[in-house]
């Protein structure tokens, strides 16, 4: 008897997973709690609702988002099909009419003979083959069920994350590798500040403009400990940061031979050391303000931010400890996750993860090995990032060129370099897809 796969959530990831499975000839029960119940962020009754913006990011192939979208097209994406049918003019971005986009996806899902839509809330993880794609605002009962299965320490309810920058964009003449007191290996990159540099930075930080939180986020953040934004900490006093995340003790600047007045430390975000996060810099500043203020840190004047700091309601797993690169749960192989809950950030990334989860579920049911996409493809790199057990202090990540292997030769023009990297990844993905069943 053919098994039926349950998919929980009809956002972009859930719809892509259900569509992918159905296109592979597998029956799907798609559970969606709308219109019975809405999350605080959702308003429209249709599936695949875009709530923050009608832009699906840059369209050009040489951008991280454009590269990922092209990969999705190669994988048979319903999202990309819907976007092509409902696009509106938006310069270099792929933008859509949000309601028409949602209606298109909803109609395609309802019309598929192998997909049964069940409008009800799911409070517990179902038995049997299942894909959970319930989104960053997963309902409380289901979140508790996931927490019980995965372990309380492996599920976060707030994304309180520091910015991440690329290593190659740092000014190596101003920074230095060192651990405090010389203990252990030189795990940190240190950005030293003298008194004048610190005071300028401090003043800019406390005067910077914060982003607006939703009412439900603001209320919940007031009771969430260990989530203090760096700008809020700074407002407690001019020296608070110097006795906190910017403390200079145990460090000597090799350029001066003296202890700095303050030090910003960067910690490696991945095994390759191509990405670094700013330690202790969880923040709620607006993205342009983060770029302006944090670029005042010595060594970060020209830093490329692949992810800005965020602080918002976001249910997500500590995926490197829990998931395989196929998006399946290590301790329960017939349970897959997709979407922002896995630690991919953004509409496009969430949809892409749904495709890969759906394809790998279909392959598992057929007794085949999961897809292992090339490491230099964007989706391949994202799937490796969320399953890489060497990643510590896991933070959600969107598509960016920093997680791809660098171009082997020096190419000064960034646009040309990114186009070469994207073309390489797409070529390898096409070759790989021709070799699999």
Image (cartoon, grey):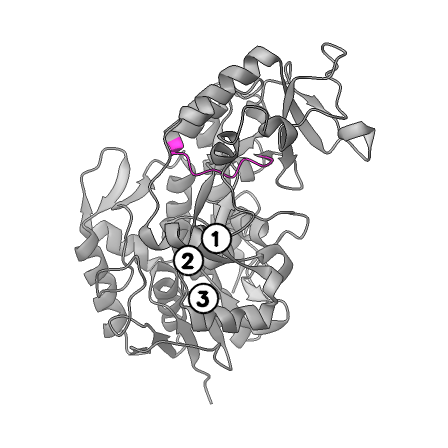
Across and down, in percent, residue 242 comes to: 62, 26
Looking at the picture, tell me which residue is in the foreground, 149 or 334: 149
Q: Nearer the viewer, mark 3 or mark 1?
A: 1
Q: Is residue 373 above or below residue 416?
A: below
Can you identify the residue that label 1 sits on?
158
List x then y, in percent, for residue 332: 60, 73
Q: Quadrant of residue 167 in the image?
A: top right
The numbered disc on residue 136 is 2
Figure quadrant of residue 239: top right
Does the magenta-highlighted stretch encompass residue 343? no
Q: Secondary structure at mark 3?
A: helix
Which residue is found at the position 38% from the left and 37% from the top?
A: 61
Q: Residue at x 76, y 30 (%)?
A: 180
Mark toward the viewer: 2 or 3:
2
Q: Is residue 171 left or right of residue 112?
A: right
CA separation in Å, label 2 and label 3: 19 Å
The residue to which callout 3 is attached is 358
Q: Secondary structure at mark 2?
A: loop
> Is residue 415 visible from the viewing direction of this image?
no
Q: Do the residues bearing badges 2 and 3 touch, measured as CB atoms within 8 Å?
A: no
The magenta segment is: 278-287
- Residue 264 screen position, x and y as percent: 61, 26
Q: What label does residue 146 carry, if any?
A: none
The reply to whether the magenta stretch includes residue 286 is yes
- The residues bearing labels 3 and 1 have C-alpha atoms spaced at a distance of 27 Å
């Amino acid at each position: 008897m053919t098994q039926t796969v349950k998919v929980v959530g009809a956002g972009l990831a859930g719809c892509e997973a259900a569509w992918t499975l159905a296109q592979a000839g597998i029956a799907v029960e798609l559970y969606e709690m709308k219109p019975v119940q809405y999350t605080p962020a959702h308003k429209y009754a249709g599936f695949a609702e875009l709530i923050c913006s009608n832009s699906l990011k840059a369209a050009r192939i040489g951008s991280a988002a454009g590269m990922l979208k092209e990969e999705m097209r190669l994988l048979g994406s319903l999202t990309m099909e819907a976007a092509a049918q409902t696009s509106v003019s938006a310069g270099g971005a792929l933008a859509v009419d949000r309601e028409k986009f949602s209606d298109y996806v909803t109609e395609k899902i309802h019309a598929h003979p192998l997909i049964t839509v069940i409008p009800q809330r799911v409070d517990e993880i179902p038995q049997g083959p299942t894909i959970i794609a319930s989104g960053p605002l997963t309902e409380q009962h289901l979140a508790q069920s996931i927490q019980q299965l995965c372990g309380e320490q492996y599920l976060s309810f707030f994304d309180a994350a520091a910015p991440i920058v690329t290593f190659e964009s740092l000014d190596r003449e101003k920074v230095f590798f060192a651990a405090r007191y010389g203990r252990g290996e030189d795990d940190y990159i240190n950005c030293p500040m003298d008194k004048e540099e610190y005071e300028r930075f401090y003043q800019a930080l406390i005067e910077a403009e914060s982003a607006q939180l939703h009412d439900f986020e603001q209320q919940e953040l007031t009771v969430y400990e260990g989530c203090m934004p760096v700008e809020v900490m700074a407002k407690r006093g001019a020296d608070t940061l110097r006795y906190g995340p910017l403390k200079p003790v145990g460090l000597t600047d090799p350029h001066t031979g003296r202890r700095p007045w303050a030090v910003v430390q960067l910690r490696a975000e991945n095994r390759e050391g191509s990405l670094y996060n700013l330690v202790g810099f969880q923040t709620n500043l607006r993205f342009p303000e983060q770029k302006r203020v944090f670029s005042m840190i010595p060594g970060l004047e020209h830093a490329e931010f692949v992810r800005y700091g965020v602080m918002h309601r976001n249910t997500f797993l500590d995926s490197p400890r829990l998931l395989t690169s196929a998006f399946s749960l290590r301790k329960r192989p017939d349970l897959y996750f997709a979407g922002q809950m896995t630690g991919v950030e953004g509409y496009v990334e969430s949809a892409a993860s749904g495709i890969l989860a759906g394809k790998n579920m279909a392959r598992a049911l057929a007794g085949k090995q999961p897809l292992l996409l090339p490491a230099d493809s964007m989706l391949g790199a994202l799937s490796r990032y969320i399953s890489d057990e060497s990643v510590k202090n896991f933070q959600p990540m969107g598509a960016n060129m920093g997680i791809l292997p660098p171009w082997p030769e020096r190419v000064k023009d960034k646009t040309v370099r990114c186009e070469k990297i994207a073309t390489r990844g797409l070529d390898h993905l096409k070759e790989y897809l021709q070799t699999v069943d």
